Amino acid sequence: MEKLYTASVTVIGGRDGHAKSSDGIFETDLRKPKEMGGQGGAPNPEQLFATAWGSCYLGALHSVAAPEGVDTSNANVNVHVSFNKNGEGFALSADLDVHIPDISIEEAQSIADKAHAVCPYSKATKGNIETRVTAV
């Protein structure tokens, strides 16, 4: 495997902490959401993961749609990452709602599934978290 890029972020304090990239471009406080007993008011890991997955997924969507002649320049994906209690532990789940304008819902679902099969984040989570991809 040939590395093309490596992101490096230092996090201190966990869910109620601070994150900063090595290049200084990205820096944010982190806060546990109110729904989990935190104070909220800053990004949390699930939001950051949803953001990263969504942007990567749209790149994959563009790459699989282009050879089929489908314009995805106005497509969007709403990524919902949930933090769940699972027995005595915890687990993530995700829902990706994919909108591709100006094509049928069946064609959109086919392209959405193809993108999910090649997206690096989708591949990394395959078999690890419950994921639903739905054309909307």
Image (cartoon, rainbow, N blue to C red):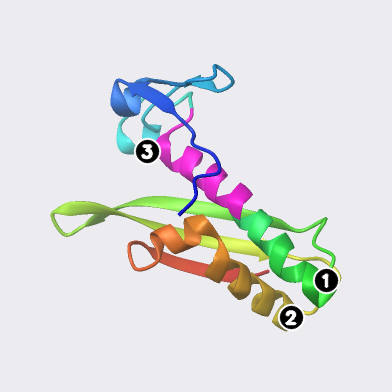
Query: How many marks are shown on the rendered structure?
Result: 3
Identify which residue is drawn at 30% across, 32% down: 37
Q: Which mark is drawn over residue 107?
A: 2
Expressed as whole percent of the image width and height from the top left, the position of residue 60 reads 64, 60
- What distance separates the C-alpha of mark 2 from that of mark 3? 37 Å
Is residue 58 shown left or right of residue 88?
A: right
Going by the numbered disc 3, the residue's amino acid type is Glu
Quarter of the figure with residue 91: bottom left
* In front: label 2 or label 3: 2
Considering the image in quadrants, where does the C terminus appear? bottom right
Q: Are the residues flagged by discs 2 and 1 in contact, CB closer than 8 Å?
A: yes
Q: Earlier in the sequence, mark 3 or mark 1?
A: 3
* In front: label 2 or label 1: 1
**Residue 46 part of the magenta segment:** yes
Quarter of the figure with residue 65: bottom right
Is residue 128 shown left or right of residue 122?
A: left
Q: Which residues are magenta?
A: 43-56
Q: Which mark is drawn over residue 14?
A: none
Going by the numbered disc 2, the residue's amino acid type is Glu
Is residue 16 shown left or right of residue 111?
A: left
The residue that disc 1 covers is 70
